[in-house]
Image (cartoon, rainbow, N blue to C red):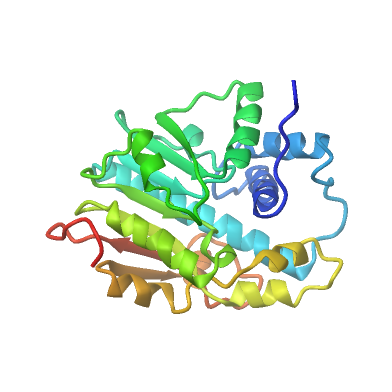
Amino acid sequence: MTRIGVPAGVGGTAVRVARVRAAESRRADALFRDDLAAAFVRAATADGQERPASRTPSRTGLAMAEHVVLRTRFFDDYLTAEAASGTRQVVLVAAGLDTRAFRLDWPEGTRLFEVDLPEVLAFKERVLAAEGAVAVCERHTVAADLREPWGGALAAAGFEAGAPTAWLVEGLLAYLRAEDAAAVLEAVGELSAPGSALSLSYGAGLGRLVGQSPEDDPFQQVSDLFQGGLDEPADTWLSRHGWQVSAHPKTALAASYGRAPAYPSDASFLVARRPTGAHAGPA
């Protein structure tokens, strides 16, 4: 049987994110626990597609790790709050090696959809099966290229457009061209019933820092994949398309979690909501 490895390019960045989550999970004061993250890193390392961490992290690496840790905790809290408020349908757009279906405390009846490239999902399923991982909610995977229409594949997997949905777009938009990033968010809007919510992060500071990293820094490879994302601030774009947006500055969140920021940041995490009196579809 052919061994399915993690894909190169953007798919490979998911392993770097898993490495950060695994490291955070080993801390006594961890902001979250992701026991499966280390399994993804081990599998990628065994395949020869991820080198063991051996060098002292650069400033860029520390900043990226801090960002991943803070956004993971913030999005964990966001999804947990949406589920507690009664939302039972969750969609992770560009899910990568996300393990929230296995590690968050989901209420009974929660249906979670993970959308990503088929090769990313194939690697993920191989590792999950080897670990004997069992989801604590109803989990569906949706193989799709987000640069192409993907709503039909989501519907075919059982997604109900008429039900309020908690959407998460984590670490994706910067890897897309402006028109593709807008198309992803437009598709989310078209599929969002009144009462739906969407969360994502935005801010150019981290991208600038990665772009300034030395050529031999592993995170320089991440910079090479950046396409820029939306051509306007995400909160402005979302407001123009019928969402009610609240911003949560990353620096303030770091302080609230008891973590001193490693570098100045203009990034924010956004939570946007479809008003209950709104209709699904473009604004």
In the rendered image, residue 194, in percent from the top left (x then y), is placed at 19, 54
Direction from residue 147 to residue 151 in the image, left or right: left
> Is 128 drawn above or below residue 171 in the view shown?
above
Quadrant of the snapshot with the C terminus: bottom left
Q: At x 43% / y 28%, what residue is drawn?
A: 136
Q: Is residue 78 visible?
A: no
Q: Residue at x 59, y 48 (%)?
A: 30
In the orientation shown, which residue stands out farthest toward the left? 277
- The answer to whether 105 is drawn above or below residue 263 in the figure is above
Q: Front-most of 200 and 74?
A: 200
Left or right side of 45 for 106: left
Instruction: Locate residue 204 relative to residue 169 in the image: left or right.
Output: right
In this rendering, the answer to whether 200 lies above or below 50 is: below
List x then y, in percent, for residue 14: 64, 49
Marker count (numbered): 0
Which residue is at a point 30% across and 55% down the rendered structure image? 197
Give the x, y percent position of residue 249. Answer: 46, 72
Q: Position of residue 265 (x, y in %)?
A: 57, 76
Residues 242 and 51: in front is 242
Quadrant of residue 56 in the image? bottom right
User: Does any portion of residue 121 appear in the rendered image?
Assistant: yes
